Each structure stands twice: as C-alpha cells, then as structure tokens.
Image (cartoon, helix red, strand yellow):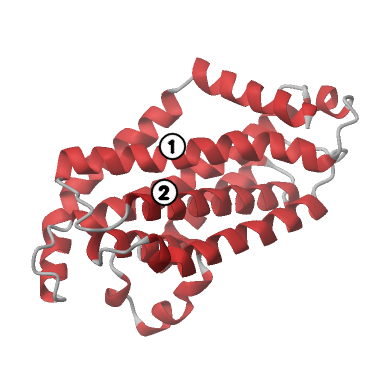
Amino acid sequence: MTAALAITKLQLRIIRNDPWFLLIMFLMPLVVMPLFVKTLGLGLVASGFESASGAEVVVPGQVVLFGFFVGGSVGFALYREHGWKTWDRLRASAAPSRSLLAGFAVPWTVIHVAYQLILFLAGGLALGLRFNGGSPFALVLVAVGYGACIVALVLLVSASFRTINQVNAFQNVGAMALGGLGGALVPLEQLPGWAQAIAPVTPQYWAMRGFRGVFLESASIVDVLPSAAVLFGTAAVLSLLAARRFRADETKEFFA
C-alpha cells in the first residue's frame, strides 16, 4: 500500500500542475447542455413529466458522456509512466501489481466522482436542475459506482493493449458508442428496439437509470440500489480481471 499511496500522490501532483484537461472537460458539457434542453424537455413533457425542463436528462447525459473521457485518463496516466521512462522505477519498488494499479485507480476514481458532482452543481446553477424530491445521497452513490466502473474498465483495457493509440481509440469510440447505447445522448425510449435490448450491458445505462430516477422520479437511496449494485458489481469484476491481466514487466508504447 505504500507504493499505491506514492503513485496516488504523484498523480494528484501532476493534475494540480496541469489542470487544463479537467478544465476543458468541465467547460465542454456546459457549452453542449443548453443546445438540447428545450428539445429533450418537450420529449419529457410528452412522456408525462409535465414539470420537466429537460435539464433532468441533459445534465446527467453529459455527465455520463464526458465522464467516460475523464475516467479514461487513467489509461493515459499509466502509459505516461512508460513514456517518461519512469515505469522501471515503480517496478523497482517490488510492490505487487495490484498495488501499482490501485495507485492509479484511487485518485482517478476520486477525480471522476468529484467531476460528476461539480458538473451536476453547475447544471443546477446554469440550467435550473433540481432534485424535486430525489435524494442527494442517492446521486452520490450512483456517481461513485459509475466512477469506479469506468476507471476499472479502462484499467482492464490498458492492461490488455500495447499502445496508447489503442487505448485512445477505445476511449473515443467507447465514449460515444456506450454513451449512445446507455441513453446519454438521447433518452433510452427514443432508441431503436435493438439498442434498448442491449443497453443494460453498458455501465452508462445503469448510471443514467439512477440519475434519471433521482431527478425525475424522486428516487431515494433504496430506489437506486439496483443501479448502484450493478455498477459496483461490474467495477469489482472488471478490477479483478484487470489485476489478473496486468503485468508490470510488459512494455507499453506511449509514443506510437
């Protein structure tokens, strides 16, 4: 755990010295959200949510969509150590592979959750997003589950791929494909039947289900437990797979 703590501190120091990525990932959704509020608001009203403004699905959708890019940065951080030629120094610590992975997973999960919550707050200030009886604690529970799930997924991908370009391709395509299937781009009920059928295999589906419950259906912690359970369970499975697949002595290509 000493090695994991050291890596965690290093990751946080790097982010503090160069916060521009997170700042851009924060500003972009704020630019996109107002473009779709009115259209999606009309759709919600037609679906029976008469007092909905559209922010109830637009804000969670953008949080889930751009959150994939933020969580995906854990792969970049891992490969960056190879590019900087500092990976051998981490290996020299004789720390087990799971400790090395934890050192990357923990800070990026915390960052991911903080990113989601701050973006929800910004959505409230800018677009009038309100809980309408939903539980803030339920929101936090789903956000933590989604953050853990995405970070674990990207760590598994990073452990399996050889080059940073492969990881970036997965991150870019995965954000749009999984986000679209999960209902982050348009409400799930507006997707084709085949897409609705396979949507539950994506973490985005369960995150959107939990977030929509909080803002549209006054969901409590008990109400979002099924979504949270799937997210945490998936994160646990993905983490175990990543730990089994990860090899500290494998060479990764950062400049490829």
**Looking at the rendering, which quadrant does residue 74 occupy?**
top right
Task: Say what secondary structure mark 2 lies in.
Answer: helix
Q: Label 1 belongs to which residue?
A: 114
Q: In percent of the image, x 59 and y 33: which residue is there?
A: 107
Few, some or many residues within 10 Å of mark 1 (<14, 14–19, 20+): some
Residue 66 drawn above or below residue 194? above
Is residue 252 something that shows in the picture? no
Mark toward the start of the polypeptide (1 vs 2): 1
Amino acid type of the residue tagged 1 in the rendering: Ala
Is residue 97 something that shows in the picture? yes
Which is nearer the eye, 6 or 222?
222
Q: Could you tell me residue 56's position as x and y percent?
A: 22, 57
Q: In percent of the image, x 66 and y 58: which residue is there?
A: 236
Q: Label 2 belongs to which residue?
A: 140
Q: CA distance from mark 1 to mark 2?
A: 10 Å
Which is nearer the eye, 229 or 251?
229
Disc nearest the viewer among 1 and 2: 2
Task: Say what secondary structure mark 1 lies in.
Answer: helix
Q: Could you tell me residue 146's position as x and y percent?
A: 49, 54
Q: Quadrant of the N terminus?
A: top right
Q: In percent of the image, x 50 and y 35: which residue is there?
A: 111
Amino acid type of the residue tagged 2 in the rendering: Val
